[in-house]
Image (spheres, rainbow, N blue to C red):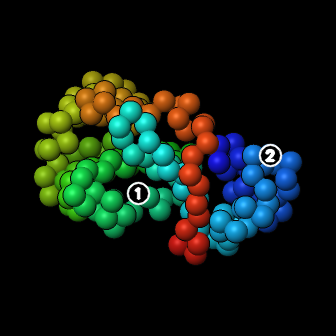
Amino acid sequence: MPRTETAHTEALGEDIDEDDVPDVTLDQLQDSGVLASDGPVLRAGEHDGWSLVIESEGSYLAADDMVKSVSRETVALSLRDRESGSCWISYAEDGEILSSFDPLFPDHEYGTRPEVLEQLTGHGAAISNGDRADAYANAVRAIHQRLQCTVPQEADESRLLTLKIADEY
């Protein structure tokens, strides 16, 4: 589903009608579990050689266990920016979180080898050279540029495979 339809589905739940989601039927939503009770709605796709999963609401994907799991035999980058102002960045390789921190408090980083992400991206300099209020945006910009994993807004707005993980909150 596109981002807009996903947002409508999350906001309206079972009160949704076909006019709210013109590209899918209510039967498809019901059969796929998207209208199930509580749980994160995830949208997955690919952009420029990177796999991506977007969770517009919640922190299911940012949980340490999830970041470790999806990084097995590869790398994972989790960027969480909530409307409440809570931000967090985690980087893992092969099931191990190497770096995990709030950009507002970069000195309180944890992970087994936080220097790896710094060496790859230089995000620390990006944080310290800007205004504190822009710490998250500056860190993300540095990470995206150096890892070449920028996901443009159009990729988030397009139709992506959508699923709900029922009862995971």
Q: Nearer the viewer, residue 45 or 146?
A: 45
Q: Amino acid at mark 2?
A: Pro
| Residue 78 as seen in the image, left or right of residue 97 | right
Q: Amino acid at mark 1?
A: Ala
| Residue 166 as seen in the image, left or right of residue 86 | right
> From mark 2 to mark 1, how far is it between C-alphas?
31 Å
Q: Residue at x 56, y 52 (%)?
A: 161
Q: Nearer the viewer, residue 166 or 160?
A: 160
Residue 15 picture quarter = bottom right
Most extreme residue toward the top is 129
> Pointer 2: what residue?
22
The quarter in which the C terminus is drawn is: bottom right
Residue 19: percent from left, percent from top: 86, 48
Residue 124 picture quarter = top left
Q: Is residue 85 above or below residue 126?
A: below
Q: Earlier in the sequence, mark 2 or mark 1?
A: 2
> Pointer 1: what residue?
62
